[in-house]
Image (cartoon, rainbow, N blue to C red):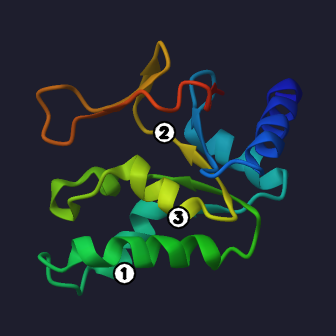
Amino acid sequence: MVEKLELLHAEISSLSNQRYKVFFLLPTTTNQQKLINDINREGIPTVNIGLYLSEQLRLVPSDKRPFDVAKWLRKAINDQKHNVVCIHNIEYLFDPELKQNPIKLLEAQSGNTVLLVIWPGKAENGVLYYATPEHPEYYQNTEYSNSIMFY
């Protein structure tokens, strides 16, 4: 675990000078809650984005939600007042109702904050996947092959 945390800190340092500061964590040898606990022990705040967004958007008419997602995501990140924030339970971002490209949305929100994203899907050969091809929420991204850590 110590080695993985050291690697993670090195990745965080290298992201500080990048335009997009997004790094993906895939819990493979541990469960998500243990990963969240490890990150909290390092003094990095964590945010359950699915819960937060669903609470904020529940009173917004569904046709208006796509226009409010970025605002609430930015608020959730900025409220942490930290230069590194870990977000998890991001599945809601893939909901077709929101009409978002989740990774582009995260890139836009990273700004001055390194975002550690606990990825709810899988990664193979540097490609991030969410859901299966026949699923309406299916998503894949090849742009972050060097920003993935199996934890």
**Distance (Cα) linking label 3 and label 1:** 17 Å
As drawn, the residue found furthest toward the bottom would be 59
**Nearest to N terminus: mark 3 or mark 1:** 1
Q: Position of residue 67 (x, y in %)?
A: 26, 76
Amino acid type assigned to the residue bearing label 3 in the image: Gln
Task: List the residue tagged with mark 2.
Answer: 119
Amino acid type assigned to the residue bearing label 1 in the image: Gln
**Distance (Cα) linking label 1 and label 2:** 22 Å
Residue at left 62%, top 21%? 29
Task: List the residue tagged with mark 1.
Answer: 56
Confirm or deny contact between disc 3 and disc 2 (CB under 8 A): no
**Distance (Cα) linking label 3 and label 2:** 16 Å
State the residue in front, 145 or 130. Answer: 145
State the residue in front, 110 or 19. Answer: 19
Q: Residues within 10 Å of mark 3 (few under 14, many from 20)?
A: many
**Nearest to N terminus: mark 3 or mark 2:** 3
Task: List the residue tagged with mark 3.
Answer: 109
**Nearest to N terminus: mark 1 or mark 2:** 1
Q: Residues within 10 Å of mark 2 (few under 14, many from 20)?
A: many
Q: Secondary structure at mark 3?
A: helix
Q: Secondary structure at mark 1?
A: helix
Residue at left 57%, top 30%? 27
Amino acid type assigned to the residue bearing label 2 in the image: Trp
Q: Residues within 10 Å of mark 1 (few under 14, many from 20)?
A: some
State which quadrant residue 44 falls in: bottom right
Left or right, 144 with reference to 95: right
As drawn, the residue found furthest toward the top would be 125
Question: With respect to residue 116, does 127 lie above or below?
Answer: above
Residue at left 49%, top 61%? 108
Question: With respect to residue 2, does 80 lie above or below?
Answer: below
Left or right, 49 with reference to 114: left
